[in-house]
Image (cartoon, rainbow, N blue to C red):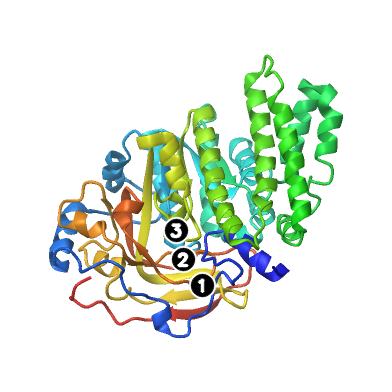
Amino acid sequence: MTRHRIAIALTSVVTCGAVAAGLPAVAAPADQAAMTHAPTTGPVRGSASTVVDTLDRASHPLRTVEPGGVTRDLRPLDRMIGDARVVGLGEATHSSHEFFTLKHRVFRHLVEEKGFRTFALEAPWSTGLRLNAYVLRGEGDPRRIMREEFQRDYLWWNNAEYLALVEWMRAYNRRHPDDPVRFMGDDFAWAGPELYDEVTDYVAGAHPGLLARFTSLYRGLRPTMSAGAYIEQYLNMPYAERKERADRTGRALRLLKRQAPGADRAAYDWAVRHATAVDQTARGYAFDFGDPEQLRAAMRFRDSVMADNVAWWAEHTGEKVLLSAHNAHVAYVPDDPAHYPKMQGAFLRDRLADAYVSIGFTFARGSFNATAPEDEVRRFSLGPAGPGSNERTLDRVRHRDYFVDLRTAPRPARNWLRDARPTRSIGTGYPEPERDIALAHSHDVLIHLNRVEAAHLRDRPPASGSVAQQDPLPSDGPG
């Protein structure tokens, strides 16, 4: 497998994008038909107008997608979430303003009304530590932290919308020092130097006789470069070397786990978790990305790691968590099962049962940032969703923006929601084909937005524009 193809494959491992083993993750379509395929199910059960009428009665309008102001319109969402300890809140693109701002708004509401205290992001564990130090104690400059941490595959999170969320979290903690909110990252592609320091500092204090052993096992692994360069270095590393690194981090983790916790059990637990995160990074790269089955296993490994990190955090801190990730990652079933065998949402449901709730997003039209086939970050615009899609019918509901409980929607909407049909699921790259998704099997709750606009990326020149799809306006025909 060439270095270029390894890079493509691993980008798919650490982001949510289309992937085919040994082939480019994103391919430009020959024509519009390549972008939107026909439903794989039979005809819609019940007329579209009856489905829409039922959704009209079951849905709850959103007052706004922007944070701030009263949140009475979100109270029905409280009932849908119930006693969940972890709520996965997705996004139908990785870079649209409204998905990010509504997450901010929902998190504020859940903090104030439901006792949630952690915002978890599809970002590395060590990145979460740095941002958490800022929101808790004001350590560092969030703009610099985001610039340094959100590079390469995570560049989408270096945006003005998330900066506003982080700054609100810091302001909240100034007002509530005894009951703070926290920030965590649940992903693995980058293990910052502070992660190694946390482990070796603990070993030096609690088990000084083991320090030389840990220093030897971690030799050459502690990053001395930026996050983007670190990921790039791993992409260009021979498979045997990647496996050898994972062997060393695994031995270090097992050695630490064999030690007695001592008087400070919390310090021990956190040190083991940091060593686990170091090992997750090394093991995440220790797959043979030239082997289709190994690549598929790498996809499964990533989602299992993210779920394990979130569940561990919820269990050990006792805090309720709002988890931000792509729709596909918070879902119960994969939208591309040939390449993504099991998703984070399914792992969390296995671990937490009904204490996990999944909320997905759809949108009817608008824009987003993504990487074009020529590797340039561009702003793409989509017209109204095409006939036969989930979004075409969802956008006929009388509310512009709304949410609906997919578990309790009355028939015939419930039957309609259980059928798979083309749905936009856009990761880091575009063009990307629509996926046949049965919304009620993927999520518990759905938020539908009429229009979205591209997020405001920081530290980058304005993305060039591109009209990715321009369908005619929706008709009154079947959805």
Q: Secondary structure at mark 1?
A: loop
The residue nearer to you, when weighing 238 against 476, is: 238
- Label 1: few (<14), some (14–19) or many (≥20) C-alpha neighbours in 10 Å: many
Residue 397 vertical position relative to residue 330 in the rendered view, above or below: below
The numbered mark at residue 388 is none
Circles 1 and 3, Cβ within 8 Å, touching? The answer is no
Q: Dot 1 corresponds to which residue? A: 430
The residue at the point 42 percent across, 79 percent down is 34
**Percent of width and height locating residue 188:** 63, 48
Q: Residue furthest top?
A: 263
Circles 1 and 2, Cβ within 8 Å, touching? The answer is yes
- Horizontal side of residue 47 vs 238, given as left or right: left
Residue 146 vertical position relative to residue 272 in the rendered view, above or below: below
Q: Quarter-wise, where is residue 21 in the image?
A: bottom right
Q: Dot 2 corresponds to which residue? A: 426
Q: How many marks?
A: 3
The numbered mark at residue 337 is 3
Residue type highlighted by circle 1: Tyr
Residue type highlighted by circle 2: Ile
Residue type highlighted by circle 3: Pro
For residue 122, say whether it is visible: no
- Horizontal side of residue 413 vs 454, given as left or right: left
Marks 3 and 2, how far apart at CA? 16 Å
Q: Quarter-wise, where is residue 81 in the image?
A: top left
The residue at the point 40 percent across, 69 percent down is 434
